[in-house]
Image (cartoon, rainbow, N blue to C red):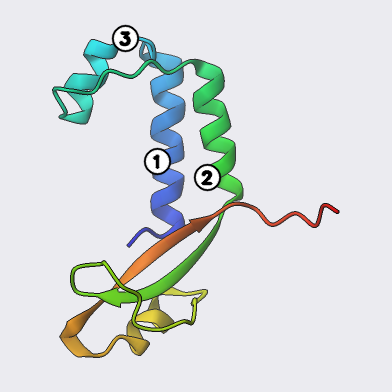
Amino acid sequence: MLTRQEILLISAALQFWAEEMNPEDTHLLKIYSGHETADQIWKSDDIQRLRTQLSSASLKYAVANARGTELLTTELFSAPEAADQARPGESGQVGTLVLPEFTNKV
Protein backbone atom coordinates (compact mmCIF):
# COMPACT_ATOMS: atom_id res chain seq x y z
CA MET A 1 0.00 0.00 0.00
CA LEU A 2 1.40 3.40 -0.97
CA THR A 3 0.75 6.54 1.01
CA ARG A 4 1.03 10.18 -0.06
CA GLN A 5 4.33 10.43 1.85
CA GLU A 6 5.73 7.48 -0.10
CA ILE A 7 4.64 9.07 -3.38
CA LEU A 8 6.58 12.19 -2.32
CA LEU A 9 9.68 10.06 -1.69
CA ILE A 10 9.34 8.42 -5.11
CA SER A 11 8.97 11.85 -6.70
CA ALA A 12 12.11 13.09 -4.92
CA ALA A 13 14.03 10.00 -6.02
CA LEU A 14 12.93 10.60 -9.61
CA GLN A 15 14.14 14.19 -9.41
CA PHE A 16 17.49 13.02 -8.03
CA TRP A 17 17.76 10.45 -10.83
CA ALA A 18 17.06 13.13 -13.45
CA GLU A 19 19.53 15.64 -11.98
CA GLU A 20 22.37 13.55 -10.60
CA MET A 21 22.39 10.35 -12.64
CA ASN A 22 22.30 9.72 -16.35
CA PRO A 23 18.67 8.65 -16.87
CA GLU A 24 19.52 7.33 -20.34
CA ASP A 25 22.18 4.91 -19.02
CA THR A 26 20.48 1.51 -19.10
CA HIS A 27 23.39 -0.04 -17.14
CA LEU A 28 22.65 2.23 -14.15
CA LEU A 29 18.97 1.33 -14.30
CA LYS A 30 19.86 -2.36 -14.19
CA ILE A 31 22.06 -1.81 -11.12
CA TYR A 32 19.66 0.38 -9.14
CA SER A 33 16.44 -1.41 -10.09
CA GLY A 34 17.82 -4.84 -9.30
CA HIS A 35 16.51 -6.17 -12.62
CA GLU A 36 19.15 -7.55 -14.97
CA THR A 37 16.70 -7.31 -17.86
CA ALA A 38 15.84 -3.62 -17.34
CA ASP A 39 16.61 -2.06 -20.69
CA GLN A 40 14.77 1.25 -20.62
CA ILE A 41 15.92 4.67 -21.64
CA TRP A 42 14.45 7.57 -19.70
CA LYS A 43 14.79 11.19 -20.73
CA SER A 44 14.56 14.06 -18.24
CA ASP A 45 11.27 15.18 -19.82
CA ASP A 46 9.81 11.69 -19.27
CA ILE A 47 10.85 11.78 -15.62
CA GLN A 48 9.36 15.25 -15.10
CA ARG A 49 6.10 14.11 -16.72
CA LEU A 50 5.96 11.13 -14.37
CA ARG A 51 6.70 13.35 -11.36
CA THR A 52 3.87 15.68 -12.38
CA GLN A 53 1.46 12.77 -12.78
CA LEU A 54 2.39 11.36 -9.38
CA SER A 55 2.17 14.68 -7.56
CA SER A 56 -1.26 15.47 -8.98
CA ALA A 57 -2.65 11.94 -8.72
CA SER A 58 -5.46 11.04 -6.40
CA LEU A 59 -4.80 8.10 -4.08
CA LYS A 60 -7.65 5.79 -3.23
CA TYR A 61 -7.56 2.59 -1.24
CA ALA A 62 -9.36 -0.66 -1.98
CA VAL A 63 -9.74 -3.98 -0.20
CA ALA A 64 -8.56 -7.00 -2.16
CA ASN A 65 -8.22 -10.70 -1.46
CA ALA A 66 -4.95 -11.97 0.02
CA ARG A 67 -3.48 -12.63 -3.44
CA GLY A 68 -4.48 -9.19 -4.71
CA THR A 69 -6.41 -10.63 -7.62
CA GLU A 70 -9.97 -9.61 -6.71
CA LEU A 71 -11.56 -6.66 -4.99
CA LEU A 72 -13.60 -7.67 -1.95
CA THR A 73 -15.66 -4.46 -1.84
CA THR A 74 -16.86 -2.05 -4.48
CA GLU A 75 -16.05 0.93 -2.30
CA LEU A 76 -12.93 3.06 -2.74
CA PHE A 77 -11.66 4.71 0.42
CA SER A 78 -9.93 8.07 0.81
CA ALA A 79 -7.80 6.90 3.74
CA PRO A 80 -5.90 3.65 4.22
CA GLU A 81 -7.25 3.35 7.76
CA ALA A 82 -10.83 3.30 6.47
CA ALA A 83 -9.98 0.58 3.97
CA ASP A 84 -8.22 -1.41 6.67
CA GLN A 85 -11.36 -1.30 8.83
CA ALA A 86 -13.37 -2.73 5.92
CA ARG A 87 -10.89 -5.57 5.47
CA PRO A 88 -12.46 -8.93 6.41
CA GLY A 89 -9.90 -10.20 8.91
CA GLU A 90 -6.66 -11.68 7.64
CA SER A 91 -8.20 -12.77 4.35
CA GLY A 92 -7.82 -9.38 2.72
CA GLN A 93 -5.30 -6.69 2.08
CA VAL A 94 -5.43 -2.97 1.37
CA GLY A 95 -4.15 -1.79 -1.98
CA THR A 96 -3.50 1.67 -3.37
CA LEU A 97 -5.05 2.98 -6.56
CA VAL A 98 -3.12 5.83 -8.15
CA LEU A 99 -5.70 7.67 -10.20
CA PRO A 100 -4.99 10.51 -12.61
CA GLU A 101 -6.05 13.97 -11.62
CA PHE A 102 -9.73 14.46 -12.38
CA THR A 103 -10.35 17.12 -14.99
CA ASN A 104 -13.80 18.16 -16.02
CA LYS A 105 -13.04 18.58 -19.70
CA VAL A 106 -16.01 18.38 -22.03
**Quadrant of the image for the N terminus?**
bottom left
Asked if residue 59 lies left or right of residue 96, the reply is right
Give the alpha-carbon distance from disc 3 to disc 1, as whole Å.
19 Å
Q: Secondary structure at mark 3?
A: loop
Q: Position of residue 92 (x, y in %)?
A: 23, 80
Residue at 26% x, 67% y is 69
**In the image, what residue type sits under mark 2?**
Leu
User: Within the image, what quadrant is residue 24 found in?
Assistant: top left
* Separation of residues labelled 1 and 2 (CA atoms): 9 Å
**Pointer 3 local density, CA inside 10 Å: few below 14, some 14–19, many at least 20:** some
Which residue is denoted by mark 3 in the rendering? 25
Q: Could you tell me the amino acid type at mark 1?
A: Ile
Asked if the residues shown at circle 1 and circle 2 are in contact, with their CB atoms under 8 angstroms apart, the answer is yes
For disc 1, the marked residue is 10
Q: Is residue 15 left or right of residue 30?
A: right
Q: Residue 84's spot in the image, x, y percent?
A: 33, 81
Can you identify the residue that label 2 sits on? 54
Q: Earlier in the sequence, mark 1 or mark 2?
A: 1
Task: Tell me which residue sits at (42%, 18%) in the image.
Answer: 42
- Residue positioned 19% across, 68% down in the render: 67
Determine whether 73 is above or below 14 in the image: below
Eye-nearest disc, 3 or 1: 3
